Image: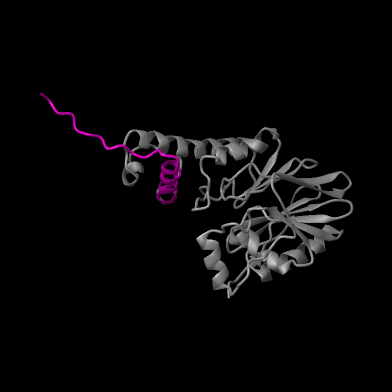
Amino acid sequence: MTSTSIGEWRELAPGIHCVTCEPEHVNVGLVVGADAAMLVDAGSTPEQGAALLESARQIAGVPVTHVVITHNHHDHWLGLAGMKDLTSIAHENLLGEPSRATRAFADSIGMTELPQPTITFSIAKAVNLGGGVRLEMLHFGGAHTRGDVLVMVPSGNVIFAGDMLESAGDPQFDETSNIKNWPTALDGVLGAANESTQFVPGHGHVVDRNFAFIQRAEIGMLYGNTEMLIQQGTKVQDAAEASDWPFTAETLKVALPLIYGELEAIGIKPRTQLPISSL
């Protein structure tokens, strides 16, 4: 049995709260309007999801009616199985191809069927909670996963970014990531942010627009440098030592082969450098 716990709720702005759930240090949001409240992400297990919902109900003061799932990794999604009374919203790709790690975790807790959302959407959806409080859920293409949802709360100037931003460490990459599009997807909300916008990452402390800009640039640099190395003929096993990188060696070990794979899929791969012979 996986041991889980829920921390103390923190108010980021009037009616907008965040709590950190263990053991994955995942941030879960709660947005409260005049008539209803809505969770952002659901935790790791059905038991944690049920506990999150009960905790949210105690501080909301209004019915908690909805939950939105930012992406299909287990620590954000599988708690949905413990929130069956809520209307749940996710991108239409949520169930498409969960990562191997998510499937393995589901198996480890005996979950034979992955929880399904009540409502899915393609590009954008909004939910009004009353009193001028509205959540805007946006998808700008694959990034961290194929179904990332960015959640904007304009009334409080808060953006829940899921794992498209990380302040607890490097961004995380897996076989479902679209690394080329990730910076472009972040641009979809960065253009609407200002100096006082609070970004809630999937893991770690709340950050500002400047942090988000920098991490967006680092992900873009990761992809751009890799493409340049490929065009120079650098093999994947040599890439980590062939350039300066913004992320750790552990992250590069995962990310570089993924980018090589993305580029090879569109016909870009290292060319063999033939020796120059003299006459």
Magenta region includes residue 273: yes
Vertical arrangement, residue 74 with respect to residue 124, above or below: below
Q: Position of residue 67 (x, y in %)?
A: 75, 57
- Coloration of the structure image: one colour
Q: Residue furthest top?
A: 279
Instruction: Look at 69% across and 54% down and name the residue there.
Output: 90
Is residue 124 rendered to the left or right of residue 33? left
Q: Position of residue 197 (x, y in %)?
A: 70, 38
Instruction: Look at 78% across and 42% down and name the residue there.
Output: 156
Q: How many marks?
A: 0
Instruction: Look at 57% across and 50% down and name the residue there.
Output: 145
Is residue 218 rendered to the left or right of residue 227? right
Task: Place residue 141 in its image quadrant.
Answer: top right
Tell me which segment is drawn in magenta.
252-279
Task: Place residue 72 in its image quadrant.
Answer: bottom right
Magenta region includes residue 231: no
> In the picture, which quadrant includes the N terminus?
bottom right
Q: Residue furthest left?
A: 279
Instruction: Look at 40% across and 50% down and name the residue there.
Output: 253
Q: Position of residue 114 (x, y in %)?
A: 63, 66
> In the picture, which quadrant includes the C terminus?
top left
Q: Position of residue 175 (x, y in %)?
A: 49, 53
The one of 243 and 66 positioned closer to us in this rendering = 66
